[in-house]
Structures are given as C-alpha cells and as structure tokens.
Amino acid sequence: MSAIVIKNNQQIPVTSIPVLDYQDFLIFNTFLLKSEENHCVNYFGIVDNKNVKLFCCIANDANQTILVSSSIINLEKTYPSFSEQHLAFEKFEREIHENFGINYTNHPWLKPVRYSFNRQQPKNTIANYPFFKIKSEELHEVGVGPIHAGIIEPGHFRFLCNGEQILHLEIQLGYQHRGIENLFLQKKKLIERNTLAENIAGDSVIGHTTAFANLWESLSNNVVSEEIMVSRTIALELERIAVHTGDLSGICTDIAFQLGSAVFGRLRTPIINFFQEWCGNRLGKSLIRVGSNHFPLTNELKTKLIVLLDKFEPDFDEMCKNTFHTPTVLGRLEKTGIISNPLGKEIGLVGMAARMTDINRDIRSSHPYGYYPLLAHQPILKGHGDVQSRGQIRREEVKQSIHYIRKLLANVPLQQEEEKIQQKLTPNSFVLSLVEGWRGEICHCAITDAKGELIHYKIKDPSFHNWLAVAMSVRNNEISDFPICNKSFNLSYCGHDL
Amino acid sequence: MISLPLIIIASLFFMGIVIRTKSITSGRKGPGIFQPMKDVFRLWKKGAVYSETTSFIFQIAPSIYFASVLMAILTIPFGEYPGLVSFNGDFVFFAYVLAIGKFFSIIGALDTGSSFEGMGASREALYSLLAEPAFFILMGSFALFTGHTSFVDIFTSLHFGTYISYALGILATFILIMIAMIENSRMPIDDPKTHLELTMVHEVMILDNSGFDLGLILYATNLKFAMYGALIANFFIESLPIYISILIFLAVQFTFAIIVGILESFNARFRMGNNAQFIFTLTSLSLLIFFGVLLILKKIV
C-alpha cells in the first residue's frame, strides 16, 4: 500500500501512514491527481529529528475517501518538485520551502507565501522584492497595496498593463501573518484553542470553528449529540447566506449599481443580527464549542429564524431578479474574469470558485460530515466561469441554504443532558477534518505525540488554492474590472497568511 | 449679468438634491440638501498638504481649474440678458476655457507621478476629447439655425415653432445632460462614489489634493453642473417676464438634479472599454440635430 485510505474526521495512528521513498511519493501523488475526481487537500511537512517528514493528503471526491501518504526527506539534498507535474502543488511546495528551506530542482518560483519576506534569505524583504518585470517602453506597471483602499486587508497586487488591458497580475500576500498554527501548539487550554480557531478568518468563523471542533472531537473520542450537529449545520448555512448576500452587495457596489448595493446590504443585516441574538456575536463567535453547545436553539429562536427567513426570501428574490435583469449590470458581469474549466482543474480550485466553472467539488456532498449525509446535498454548478456565474451561484446557494435551514428547523431535537467532555487526546494520532465553508473547503489537520500533546496543527483556508485564480481571471481584462473580479472571488487574506 | 448669481445659487443645492435623490431611491434618509456645500466650506477652512514629489504645477492646477469654470460661467446668458462676457463666437471660448482647466487638472495629476493618477488622467483626457465634437456640432447647428454665433443671440432668436424644432430641443437637452455627466465624471461613465482607484476616472486624479484645493475642485463640480443646467434652462426661457423665467430656471435645475440622481441610482457603470463608443453615440445624436436644422432651413430636400 502506498497510502492509507481514511474518511473525513477519522482518527488513525500516525504509524499507520505509509512512509514512501520520495521518488515513489512523488509518482504516487502526482499520478493520483491525473484523475479528475482527486484533488490535493493538504500537503505539509513537520520536523522529524533532523529531517522533514512530508504528508500529502489527496481527497477522492467519488468514493468519500482521503488518501494519506508520507515521505521523509533530508534537508541537505535537492529534490524534484511535484509542481512540475501538477500546478495544484505549487503553493504547497512554496510553503514547505518557506518553512524548511527544502531545495527543489525544478520548481518554477519559490517565492514567499505566508510571509512578506523570504524566510530563507531574510535580507530579501518586500522593499527589494523581485516582482515579475517586463522590459518594454509601451507597457506600464501599476502597484496596488499593501494598504487597502477600503477597509479590507493587506495584500500587494502588481499589474503589468498594456494601456487599460491587464497582461499579468502578480499577487503578494503574507502581511497578515500571525503564526496561528504555532499558537495552537503554544496555547494548552481547549478554550484558548477554540477561540484561536474562531479567529483564523473573521468571515468564516463558523466554518473554521466547525472544522476545529469536528477534528478535536474525533481526536479526543467525544461523540456529539444530534442536537449539536443540527445547530452547527444551521449556523454554517446561515453564515453562507449572510456572506453570499453581503458579497452580492459588494459586487453591486463595485459596478456602481446603487440599488443592489443598498438592498443586499440591508438584507445581510438581519441574518448576522440573528447570530447576535443566538450567541451574542454577529459573526457567530463562541457559538461552536468542542463537545458542547452553550447556546441551544430554543423554540423562541426557532420561530424568530423562521419569521426572519420568510421576510428575507421574497425581498432577496425580488432584488436578485432586478439585479440580474438590469442590462447595465449584465454588461459588466458577463464575460468578465473568466476561468475556464481546464484552467480551474489545473489550478486545483475548490468550493464556490470551482463550482462556477463546472467542477463538482463540494465537501458537503463528496465528504459529508455532521448532518449533511442526511440532507443529501446536491452541489449547484455553473459553466461559464465569469463574474456572472459567481454571482448566480451565490444567488442559488442562498436559496438552497434557506431550504436546508427550514428543513432542519422542522426537526431540531431538544437539548440533551450535557455530557462530560473528554479532554485527553489520543496519543500518536492523525486526524484530518474537512468542512465546506461558504468559500469552499476548509481543511484542519492535527498530529499528536506519544503523550497525547499536539505536535502539529495545520490549517488550510480555501483561499490558499484560489488566489491564483484571481490572478489568472483578470488577464486580458480591463484593469478597471479587477475590483469586481477580486470581489466575486472574495478570498481571505488572513486565512491565507495565517 | 443675472445668470452668474443664479448659477451660484443653483450650485449650492444641486449636489445636495442629487445625493438626496440617490438616498431616497435606495430606501435611505440621506443627508441634508446643503451637506455637500458644508463639506466644501469645511475643506476651504483647511490648509493643503503637498507631496514632496510634486512641483508648482500641482499647486496651481486646482485654482486654474476653478477659475476656468468661473470664466466659462461668465459667458452663459440668462434669456435676453447676456452674460458678463458676451461676443460673437463665445461658445467656442466657453468650450476651450473649460478645456484649459481640464488640461491643468490633467497635468496636475500627472505631476504626482502616481500610476493611478496617470491612468485617471489618460481616461479623462480621452473622454473629454470624444465629447467635444458632440458639443460643437450641437452649438454649431443652432448657430446655423439662428444665424448667430454668441450664446445670447442664439438663445434669444431660437423659437420653437415646428414639430421638428421641438424634437431638436429635446435632443439638445438630452445631449447636454449627457455631456454634463461626462464632463463631471459621473455615471454611467464614472462612479463618483467608488473607493476603487483602478476604476476611477476623475476621483483618482484628485487623490493627492487636500484641504482648500480639494474644496475648490469639489465646488467646481457643483458649479459645472449648475452651468450646464443653466444652458439647458436657456432653451426654455425665451422672452418671458423675469420672475417667471427665474422660476423656470430653478425648476430646470431641480429637475436636472433629480434626473442625475435617478440615472445614478438604477444603472451600473459602463464597462470602461464601452465608454468611448457611448460618447460617440452623443456625437451621432448631435448630427441628427444638424440634419434637422438643415431640413428646417430647407438646405436639403
């Protein structure tokens, strides 16, 4: 066996993961990715004595499995890169190089990922960072950021333009690096770690915390009640509705469609205000706790949510109809920022950004967890890969989420007796947890040592896969269309930088 | 003579009405009518900050821009009453004194050396270049129609008598509204509310301006709107008693502001690449006026 086959949230002993020779490891994993049903969910390294142990996790979307394999490499040697075989590994290998200084022989460009300077050569800071340049009299460069014009997050965007047309965009992130993964090891209390998970990315609080909770419950052998599973699912779908509606408002703002911008903005508010009523925080912080639920969905809250959705849905429908039927809006959205299906597969897109170009990738249906197996989720797919598709997918996913919430509300079980939470983690274990946040697949991965202490915690936000798609989608578009392309993906900076 | 104080009065509330209309159409209360002017006064009380990379061009550009708009306003008549500056061919003077102001605001933006402002300047230059033929064909047609070449003579001898001439008046109003939108960098050409430098036209050119200079530029926009409003009003004033024509003037300005607000509320901004095409449409519309005039004058059968 070249790899161990596991399910989402399944706990396995670290020793059961086969250790391959690097050459076999490379051939095995890159061969897996040749099949369309496989994609790389995580590829990372941990320090193993003086060597580095690499773990590669490939998810198979067809039969709900994840194939985990590993390899031990020596830092002194040079190795051929995975990226040469498949572009989807490019970012992962850059990160491994950034953390351990592994020398790859044929990686296209080992530039910084999660830091704004080169960790291996600290003298290379952003001030003298070698951006991709072009020698030309006619072309011009436009640098945007790292300070954002609005109130979003820091990132540097370097455009090479021919007049108004973008030829190339280079995105440099890492300004937001907080060392979250290390904090997970330093903080020993469960509540501290739980809070850390909530703060990975402010717009996917529920998504990241659910991934953390699922992983932790598996690692500490806690079984959660049906009631907790249902309320987590409701929270996740509510978060999807809130963010998607907010994004529709953002897209309308960026094309100066004032009506949509104002109405979608207003529609988002009652949803996040419901979170405030439910758990005391508009982003849903403190709602999800490992093994327990401090904020049960009472009958009163249930009625409120039903009334809220009944009010929300007709307004949302009307506004969507209005927006997607206004000629000037369609003129801006259609055929803007196209990612073709083959390109999307090459990049290894996940989540909403994959589904907009007809790649069926949705953890809720391919690796269901919690209450999703019972919902029998069918992903919504769009084929054009433009901003319009990304808008439409939001519209339909909101409708779908409303439908799921109504269905779940009809049968939320009463809260059961609070069970005692098992605190101790299983020693020498490996768990991988996948959650479909609103943006796409969130992957958390943990490894414990012989004493049952965490030795590695790995987080991957869907943005990590998808940032390259933003850079590719704006090519040959007008530079003034960059903001809507960017907004239509709405990727996370802090989730990427960690 | 009387047009100058009237335009200044209209400029005080024009932007306020636009913003109020936009607020109401999106279901909000919105600020008071005089809020934009209060903002301008606040800016006028402040000093300006200048970037070290800029030269004196950047410092004089806002004043010249503002002065050019004032100068252009002086040529605008009010019904039978000529403006302070009035001579044969003053509409050519009007167009090019505005162009001088624009030229200075463009080189002022280039002076900052910012790549954003360079892009904004090139866009603004292109759009005003494309809008120029529309204005000249429009005014030229009316000059041909009336046989005069100054604003006041054109407007006083312009009498709508036939159906065709009414149609021409409506077309001319539409073209002037759109030219005003383009010259002021409003929707659907440009989005004045955006925070995105990459999509801006006019806003990005004034990113480095602050304090008093910024106040001048903002107020110049209000003045320019009121100025185009006054041009449009002149089509309707004819030789009525002064108190009626003042009412008509104010009503036209008010309606114009509401039209601007509505145009900006229910449309998305055009894709940048389609703007040039759109502005050319205005030229072809003014050609329609030209042919209409030829028809009336029986120059073509």
Image (cartoon, coloured by chain):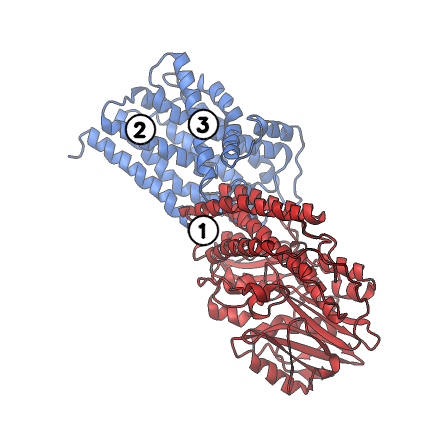
Q: Which of marks 3 and 1 is in front?
A: 1
Q: Residue at x 52, y 71 (%)?
A: A345
Circles 2 and 3, Cβ within 8 Å, touching? The answer is no
Q: Name the residue under label 3.
A: B227
Q: Name the residue under label 1.
A: A332
As rendered, which of A398 and B168 lies closer to the eye?
A398
Q: Which of marks 2 and 1 is in front?
A: 1
Are marks 3 and 1 in one subunit?
no
Q: Which secondary structure lies at badge 2?
A: helix
Q: Residue at x 50, y 69 (%)?
A: A343
**How dense is the environment of label 2, judged by Cα within 10 Å: few (below 14), some, or many (20 and up)?**
some
Relative to A133, residue B152 above or below: above
Q: Is residue A10 visible?
A: yes
Q: Name the residue under label 2.
A: B169
As rendered, which of A327 and A447 lies closer to the eye?
A447
Q: What residue type is labelled 1?
A: Arg
Q: What residue type is labelled 2?
A: Gly
Q: Quadrant of the N terminus of chain A?
A: bottom right
| Residue A364 percent location from the top left of the image | 58, 65
As rendered, which of A435 and B191 lies closer to the eye?
A435
Q: Which secondary structure lies at badge 1?
A: helix
Relative to A446, residue B166 above or below: above
Q: Which secondary structure lies at badge 3?
A: helix
Q: Is residue A471 visible?
A: no
Q: What residue type is labelled 3?
A: Met
